[in-house]
Image: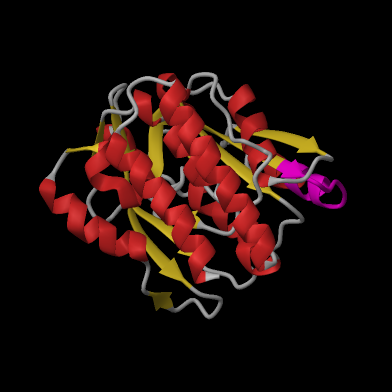
Amino acid sequence: MISIIIPTYKPQDYLWQCLDSFAAQTLDKQMWELIVVLNGCSEPWFAQLKAYQAAHPQLQIQLYQTDEPGVSNARNIGLDHAKGEYIGFIDDDDHVSPTYLEDLAKLASPDTIAAAYTIAFDETQDFIPYYIESAYQEYAPKGVLPYYQARRYFSGPCMKLIHRDIIGDRRFDTRFRLGEDTLFMFAISNRMNRVAFTDTRAVYYRRMRPGSASHRMTWSQVAHNCIRLIAQYTRIYTQGKGYHLSFYTTRVLAALHTIISQ
């Protein structure tokens, strides 16, 4: 089974587009489940989710609600309840193409993370340039790669299927407001081996919205967050085993670049 984890906060119409894209999946619906975690809010949104669940009995949907806000905490709740052998993540304002799960499932294995093609779009629904899309164009023609040779694809957990043994008991670090996605991927990287890419019919559509976390933080807050990130990367790298030096180095450089670019 596959478990897809969707954290959501005060969801708007885009969440229904996200869920509808899974209702349209070609993969047998008995082979996967959706775990929707409403975080930092309750009604009327939980009642709306219950209504969607009741209207789509063909889908296996688990619903959870927590008063504690934060996408990392919500994802951790999803991980704690996931039944699947493979785990996928999607943000509530994104959606996927009909063959997304089917094509990822064909490639994923205990030692291979499956990754999909990615297209970004803005609030006007126009497609826009996205560095992950250009990374796909670079990596996919090379076939199956060691994960550390596809580093740009591992800045976050979305658009992939990951075997649950790779994740194990590791969770998102809720202490960070920025960079927690990348930190999680680094923390599990010593259990990763290879990455295989679907063709371009399996698409993860990423909605690019203004108002990212970094734009809501002062420079000093961003700098403090990134310095703590670097310290945590270093702690994981030096205290753990099997972490790749180039992957560690690029994570540290990315955190430094964030400080400078602010």
Magenta stretch encompasses residue 39: yes
Q: Nearer the viewer, residue 235 or 94?
A: 235
Q: Residue furthest left?
A: 142
Q: In this view, does 159 lie above or below 190?
A: below
Question: In the image, is 158 to the left or to the right of 245?
Answer: right
In-image side of 89 versus 254 (left or right): right
Horizontal side of residue 151 vs 156, given as left or right: left
Q: Considering depth in this image, is 143 or 185 the residue closer to the camera?
A: 185
Residue beneath the point at 87% across and 49% down: 43
64 relative to 160 in the view: left or right: right
Residue 219 sits above or below residue 111 on the image: below
Look at the image and say whether residue 35 sits in the magenta stretch.
Answer: no
Which residue is situated farthest in the right direction here? 43
Residue 57 in view in this figure: no
Residue 93 horizontal/vertical position (percent): 58, 59
Expressed as whole percent of the image width and height from the top left, the position of residue 72 reads 64, 41
Q: In which quarter of the image is residue 74?
A: top right
Residue at figure coordinates x 45%, y 62% from the top left: 257
> What span is colored magenta in the figure?
38-50
- How many numbered marks have been drawn onto this rendered protein structure? 0
Q: Residue at x 64, y 53 (%)?
A: 224
